[in-house]
Amino acid sequence: QAVGAGARSRFRGFAAISALDYHAATSADTVCPWCEMHCQRSFIDVAVDEGAGRPWSKVKLDPGWLRLIVNNACPKGLLENAHEVKAVKNELDRLRDETLDTAQLVQDQAFRAPR
């Protein structure tokens, strides 16, 4: 995402990248359950102050850590379990309810009965 005039970047700098504390895990607990491909994903956990952790995960993650999920073949693999699927679905439903459905509006206007 481009940074506009006067806006601040969230980039922490190369020194912060060099100093990152992280670890990676690839195991039976990281296999994606969402389709028949069963991708052998890797969890890359990075220490960041704002990380919420994942105490509910099969591969536990303490607060202060953020998880990146890689090596998946589809977007479903970015979700770790049903807990996250439900959270994503709730957010999509909220956005759908708050957003004007312009396609439906055009259809309603184009095919309404003449007066």
Image (cartoon, rainbow, N blue to C red):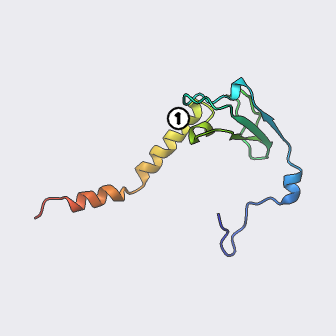
Between 72 and 95, the residue placed more toward the observer is 72
Q: Quick check: 108 left or right of 83?
A: left
Toward the bottom, the furthest residue is 5
Q: Quick check: 4 left or right of 60?
A: left
Res. 60 in view = yes
Q: Position of residue 97 (x, y in %)?
A: 41, 49
Where does the N terminus fall, quadrant-wise? bottom right
Give the residue type that dot 1 points to. Lys
Res. 64 in view = no
Mark 1, other Cα within 10 Å: few <14 / some 14–19 / many ≥20 = few
Q: Position of residue 51 (x, y in %)?
A: 74, 43
**Residue 7 vertical position relative to residue 48 in the rendered view, above or below:** below
Residue 23: name its quadrant.
Answer: top right
Between 70 and 103, the residue placed more toward the observer is 70
Number of numbered discs overlaid on the protein picture = 1
Q: What residue appears at the point 79 percent right and 36 percent down from the top-left corner?
A: 24
Toward the left, the furthest residue is 115
Where does the C terminus fall, quadrant-wise? bottom left
Toward the top, the furthest residue is 28
SS state under label 1: helix
Residue 27: name its quadrant.
Answer: top right
Q: What residue appears at the point 29 percent right and 61 percent down from the top-left corner?
A: 106
Q: What residue appears at the point 72 percent right and 35 percent down from the top-left corner?
A: 42
Q: What residue appears at the point 57 percent right and 38 percent down from the top-left corner?
A: 76
Q: Position of residue 53 (x, y in %)?
A: 73, 37
**Residue holding disc 1:** 86
Between 57 and 31, the residue placed more toward the observer is 31
Q: Quick check: 5 left or right of 113?
A: right
Residue 13: name its quadrant.
Answer: bottom right
Q: Position of residue 15 (x, y in %)?
A: 89, 57
